[in-house]
Image (cartoon, coloured by chain):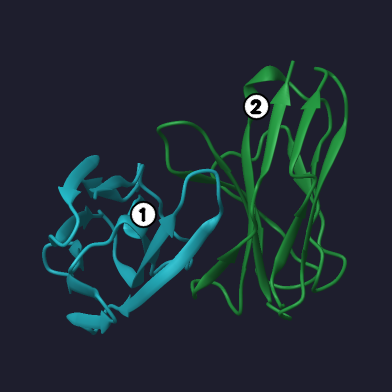
Chain colours: A cyan, B green
Amino acid sequence: SQQGEEDPQALSIQEGENATMNCSYKTSINNLQWYRQNSGRGLVHLILIRSNEREKHSGRLRVTLDTSKKSSSLLITASRAADTASYFCAPVMDSNYQLIWGAGTKLIIKP
Amino acid sequence: IAGITQAPTSQILAAGRRMTLRCTQDMRHNAMYWYRQDLGLGLRLIHYSNTAGTTGKGEVPDGYSVSRANTDDFPLTLASAVPSQTSVYFCASSENRGLKAFFGQGTRLTVV
């Protein structure tokens, strides 16, 4: 399988704390994307980081990419209750540009 | 508002019946995708289309077919539904393959 894998599977933190989620993959990639999914809803794109980039920011989100370790991390700073959702990383295979999906990290922000 | 629309939002279907899930986007995206999402699992790609007139098989294509007659529409057909096809189905599109994807709200299908 060439699935991406998120870690941890579940994360529960207090509002205001930072949340870090990790992603590992096995293949050579063109870019890596992070998505959020609220319960019962479609996925929403958060950020895309290209294979030649090491770090990218968007608002309270910070994504890092280490292609030598085939891993990425998503940091959400100053978490809010509205951040409660499942988060998925999607490495994009260099060979055919397909997105590879893991099972996601379920993030719960406690008020 | 530009976006991607799926229909129906939910459906209960008798095993053996034929069903078409509809997907339409108005962003003039070249690439479109159909995924299924089962509890505890990530998305699994069923079929994709990199551009109008072409389609390809994903990870779990058996029992499903697609067509891409034009840029906007990408219907998914279950020829003869089976209970293992009970799932939530998501359609998505991106400007080109491998780029930021926009997802529909999903179709919850139950095959009984």
* Mark 2 residue crowding within 10 angstroms, few (<14) / some (14–19) / many (20+): some
Between B10 and B50, the residue placed more toward the observer is B10
Q: Are marks 2 and 1 in contact (CB under 8 Å)?
A: no
Which residue is pictured at 11% across the width and 62% down the height?
A69
Density class for disc 1 (Cα within 10 Å; few <14, some 14-19, many ≥20) is many
Q: Amino acid at mark 1?
A: Phe
Cα separation, mark 2 vs mark 1, equals 22 Å
Location of residue A81 in the rendering, given as x and y in whole percent from the top left corner: 31, 55
Residue at image mark 1: A88
Residue B105: x, y in percent? 64, 54
Judged from the image, the secondary structure of the residue bearing numbered disc 1 is strand
The residue marked by circle 1 belongs to what chain? A
Residue at image point 41% right, 58% down: A36
Left or right of residue A16, residue B22 in this image: right
Residue A98 shown left or right of residue B66 in the figure: left
Q: Nearer the viewer, residue B97 or B41?
A: B41
Instruction: Find residue B86 and name its label.
Output: 2
- Image location (x, y in percent) of residue B46: 62, 45
The kind of residue tagged 2 is: Thr
Return the chain for callout 2: B
Q: Residue at x 39, y 70 (%)?
A: A46
Number of residue marks = 2
Q: Quadrant of residue A103?
A: top left
* Residue A7 appears in the rendering: yes
Q: For the N terminus of chain A, give its image quadrant.
A: top left
The residue depicted at 63 percent of the width and 21 percent of the height is B84
Image location of residue B92, percent across then percent down: 62, 61
Give the SS element for disc 2. loop
